[in-house]
Image (tube, grey):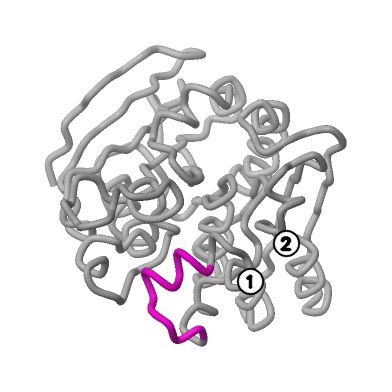
């Protein structure tokens, strides 16, 4: 599958690149960002996938989070894909910021007119890793995933639905229980249809209750002054209760004074890279 390089910038001794390709799963052109640390010049490196939140593209994380220094030091290749298919000319795809373009929710849609393109779950777990493994110096056996908000939800469901695939998982201010929050109800209703029993397959709080896989350690940072936490969009208490019941270890850090923004992510990103490096470089 042909990759077209869009940009390349040297950063902390490595290279921050952006590529475009034709996605089979999403039936459209897609961009993704890849950071190649200095270590990638001499051998295969572990790979860490970042999933962004609502309205984001591949650009937000690479320009705002300040992750490069930590990724360079720990020798991690970092992949940041887009958050939805683009330019599919589906009626209504650009009508709202929390559904359609920039809001793929990391599910495989089953409803018309979304099901042909909106297959972000399969793109993230299958197509993109295959593409990365074939074209970049990464070790396919050493892979982890993290994300923010909608992308934190994406990271958790990818890890929980695929035991053993990812060495570690972490999240910033994730949408923990989408079947119960306004964002989730809107997205799941549109992409997955009215049968709410089907929604549970993409809800971290339900998935953790039935998790039967290898040991999975989870790190979550949440800003205490996050407006979306206060508005009932994130519901971390539900996820923590379910994890505790299943004896799945979660380090949950409520960070005093922080909001939902990239200022919050930038503050704690090095902690998360370090956390993943511990498992990926073990």
Looking at the image, which residue is at 29% across and 61% down?
118
Q: In the picture, residue 248 is in which quadrant?
A: bottom right
Tell whether label 1 touches label 2 (CB within 8 Å).
yes
Residue lying at the far right of the rendered structure: 256
Looking at the image, which residue is at 73% across and 51% down?
229
Q: Which mark is residue 235?
A: 2
* Residue 2, percent from left and from top: 12, 41
Region rendered in magenta: 185-196
Q: Residues within 10 Å of mark 1 (few under 14, many from 20)?
A: some
Does residue 197 appear left or right of residue 244 in this picture? Answer: left
Q: Is residue 84 visible?
A: yes
Q: In the picture, residue 105 is in which quadrant?
A: bottom left
Does residue 32 appear left or right of residue 172 in this picture? Answer: left
Secondary structure under badge 1?
Answer: helix
The main secondary structure of the magenta stretch is helix
Nearer-the-camera pick, 261 or 148: 261
In the picture of the structure, the residue carrying the numbered disc 1 is: 180
Looking at the image, which residue is at 54% across and 65% down?
184
Does residue 232 appear left or right of residue 163 in this picture? Answer: right
Q: Is residue 22 above or below residue 14?
A: below
Nearer-the-camera pick, 38 or 95: 95
Q: How many marks?
A: 2
The Cα–Cα distance between marks 2 and 1, rounded to whole angstroms, is 8 Å
Nearer-the-camera pick, 208 or 83: 83
**Residue 260 part of the magenta-drawn span:** no
* Residue 46, percent from left and from top: 49, 42
Q: Residues within 10 Å of mark 2 (few under 14, many from 20)?
A: many
Q: Is residue 144 visible?
A: no
């Amino acid at each position: 599958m042909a990759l077209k390089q869009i940009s390349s910038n040297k950063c902390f001794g490595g290279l921050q690149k952006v590529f475009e390709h034709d996605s089979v799963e999403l039936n459209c052109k897609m961009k993704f960002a890849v950071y190649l640390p200095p270590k990638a010049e001499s051998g295969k490196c572990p790979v860490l996938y970042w999933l962004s939140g609502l309205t984001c593209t591949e650009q937000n994380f690479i320009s705002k989070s300040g992750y490069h220094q930590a990724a360079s030091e720990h020798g991690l290749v970092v992949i940041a894909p887009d958050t939805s298919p683009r330019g599919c000319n589906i009626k209504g795809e650009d009508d709202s910021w929390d559904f359609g373009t920039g809001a793929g929710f990391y599910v495989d849609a089953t409803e018309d007119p979304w099901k042909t393109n909106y297959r972000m779950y399969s793109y993230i777990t299958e197509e993109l890793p295959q593409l990365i493994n074939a074209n970049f110096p990464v070790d396919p056996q050493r892979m982890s995933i993290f994300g923010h908000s909608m992308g934190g939800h994406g990271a958790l469901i990818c890890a929980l639905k695929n035991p053993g695939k990812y060495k570690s998982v972490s999240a910033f201010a994730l949408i923990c229980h989408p079947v119960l929050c306004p964002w989730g109800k809107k997205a799941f209703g549109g992409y997955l249809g009215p049968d709410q029993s089907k929604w549970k397959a993409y809800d971290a709080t339900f998935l953790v209750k039935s998790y039967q896989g290898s040991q999975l350690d989870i790190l979550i940072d949440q800003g205490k002054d996050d407006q979306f936490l206060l508005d009932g969009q994130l519901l971390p208490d539900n996820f923590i209760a379910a994890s505790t019941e299943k004896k799945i270890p979660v380090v949950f850090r409520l960070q005093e004074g922080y909001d939902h923004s990239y200022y919050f992510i930038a503050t704690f990103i090095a902690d998360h890279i370090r956390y993943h490096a511990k498992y990926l470089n073990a």
